[in-house]
Amino acid sequence: MAKRLLGSLLAIALLPAQSLGAISNTDLEEFELSLWQVRADFHMLTVMVGSQNYASDLGASISRAERALGALRADAEGSEERQFVADLQKEWELYREAAEGNTVAEQGYTNAYTIQDVNEIPAMMVEKIDAFGEAESGKYDDVRELAAFLQRMTSEYLNIAADPAGGMSVGTDEGRLEFKDAVPQFEKMLEAARKKHAGDDAMSRALDQVSVKWKFIRESMVKFYENAVPFLIYRYTRQMVDTIDQAINLASSDVEKPTFGPVE
């Protein structure tokens, strides 16, 4: 009887470890955001013909992705989660190699297969992330998802701007976004986040700033073939993502509350 009881107690004690993973939505959203930042910076480097400033931005985004992947690796528990992260690691190594292979500054062009990898690998990685099972939820999961989706839209916009053929000459339709669908989807996500966090002063003010800046680039997203403004899209997206990052980091802090200046 005592042995059976002990066995039952052990089984119950082990259930949470088996059913609840240590990987969080925070980890996953941060990694996804960084994947799209890498893609955006890669294409912006092409748009700006290899400018060193944008090469530095790309390097910073690659470092951010590696830190995010490191967090996933550190938090993973159990064989399934560790295998999941190991698979992401393999794909990341291929993606990083491609992202670091933009030769526009040295050669005036970049290999078509490199561009294809930069466009397709992150989309496949995000599909794997989306298919991942239950992860620990966090207070600002919806805002992190909003930032990642905005960054994905911008990476697609810059992909098109960097390619004279409108982004169609390289690769497949893997991961392609239709702006006519993506723009209203982003706006629904933004409005939902503003309502949810209306009582959170720091986050509410941050999302207000995001809403203001979004209005400056919305029409360019919708009519991207008529008058491409990649620098504007790139700049405002960086500002919006930075605002969200700052708000998440400081919203719950009693030491300092984030302040956001006027739109530049």
Image: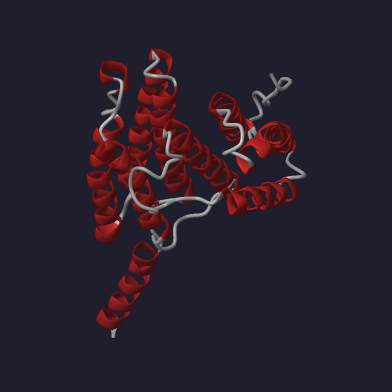
Expressed as whole percent of the image width and height from the top left, the position of residue 155 reads 47, 38
Is residue 208 found left or right of 69 in the rendered image? Answer: right
Looking at the picture, the colour scheme in use is secondary structure
In this rendering, the answer to whether 51 lies above or below 5 is above
Is residue 26 found left or right of 193 in the rendered image? Answer: left
In this rendering, the answer to whether 129 lies above or below 90 is below
Q: Residue furthest bottom?
A: 1
Expressed as whole percent of the image width and height from the top left, the position of residue 114 reads 27, 37
Report the front residue among 180 and 194.
180
Report the front residue among 188 and 17.
188
In this rendering, the answer to whether 199 lies above or below 235 is below
Report the front residue among 33 and 142.
33
The quadrant the C terminus occupies is: top right
Expressed as whole percent of the image width and height from the top left, the position of residue 21 reads 38, 58
- Residue shown at the point (55%, 49%) measured from the top left: 138
The quadrant the N terminus occupies is: bottom left
- Residue shown at the point (67%, 38%) measured from the top left: 218
Is residue 134 found left or right of 189 in the rendered image? Answer: left
Expressed as whole percent of the image width and height from the top left, the position of residue 127 reads 39, 56
Location of residue 47 by image quarter = top left
- Residue shown at the point (31%, 42%) measured from the top left: 116
So how many labels did they put on this image? 0
- Residue shown at the point (77%, 44%) measured from the top left: 199
